[in-house]
Amino acid sequence: NQEWFVKGVAKLHPALKSQIEKNVKADSLNPNIESYVINKEPKLLFWGFESKSDIEFMQSRLTLTKALSPTGAYIVRSLLSAYLHDAIWVQKPRHSLPVVDELNALVKQEAEKGNKVVLFGYSAGSFVAYEYIFNELRSINFENLAEELKEDKDTIDFLKKNPRENTCISAISKGGIGVFDTGGNLRLNQDRNKLKENYLNIDKATQAYCAPENTVLGIINHASPLALFYSDIADPRFEFSLFNKYLVKNIFENGLFFITINFREDPLGFPMTRNLPNKEMAKAAGVEIQGEPTGFLYDNSSVKSWRSFIKAHESYYNAKKIFPKAVAKTINDGRRIQYDETYRQKLIEK
């Protein structure tokens, strides 16, 4: 519901702005402490209208079951369809990628103004935020990728001999380098002459299709069922998992953050990560961090909303006191548990 979403963000944003700015200024570990000011007006991306025909079809099927099923079963079906429909719809690449392109256009507009961007992904919007950093951040170094690809020696040697700037998955796809197949593996262009020609021009595709450099500060996902729907990102049989390793490496090395905040009563709020120290997390992810890490991943799925499990998922934008404080505290805790040994020990003991 666009009206509910727009009104909810309008009510919540001033409280978020106030709490985050106040906490950031008190956080000596934040590298942006002096210049961290949040714009008064948030940028909204509502894509719910895109799934209108799907929702109408689903609702017509629900109406049929009302007369055929016990009331309890009908209520459960209604709740599942209301909460999960957008998640199922947007997870399909043919739906998510146009939304990601729309989001990238907004990010580029902000970059042209000299602004940084933090992505807030609510519920199924957390899928869009994740797909954005997965597809658009410049996490891929082809010299490193060449070592991982099971391609012919001539292709691998060519990639190594012609180093290019870090790029993103969107540039690889739209630049004619390769695509992900249905099995989750990257297939390079089978026309090897065309592959080499396109690869030599990959820097142009990177500028055209990837997120602007040093613009995205991080992600704050909330009410997020991401771990439920994207569990295959950890499957070593898929090259998706390889590109997620590159993404984690990028987050740590370039000072980004990936935060998940869920109300503990929210049945669709799934934890995304164990809150390990960065070296342990990098080891678990199978990545080698170059230099001293500055970014972090952090999950806080224990926020008390004081709502029932039925209402919790839709209550984030009404929780003007609870949720903004939880966001601000989670940003600070996420950074400090990574880079403040004394604080980490206190949390472990607690």
Image (cartoon, rainbow, N blue to C red):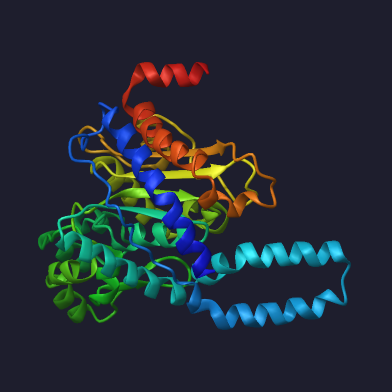
Choose between 273 and 192: the one closer to the eye.
273
Q: Quadrant of the N terminus?
A: bottom right
Identify the residue shown where x is 37% and y is 64%.
Answer: 44
Identify the residue shown where x is 45% and y is 53%.
Answer: 11
User: Residue 314, how many percent across, how many down?
Assistant: 59, 55
User: Residue 129, how many percent across, how many down?
Assistant: 40, 58
User: Residue 157, how many percent across, how many down?
Assistant: 17, 62
Choose between 55 and 273: the one closer to the eye.
55
Q: Image quarter for residue 174?
A: bottom left
Task: Kindly tell me whether residue 258 is visible in this rendering.
Answer: no
Against 248, is 336 above or below? above
User: Residue 110, how many percent across, how many down?
Assistant: 22, 61
Choose between 282 and 186: the one closer to the eye.
282
Task: Kindly tell me whether residue 254 is visible in this rendering.
Answer: yes
Q: Give left or right: position of 316 versus 118.
A: right
Q: Image quarter for residue 291?
A: top left
Q: Give left or right: position of 83 versus 118.
A: right
Query: How many dots with numbers?
Result: 0
Identify the residue shown where x is 51% and y is 16%.
Answer: 349
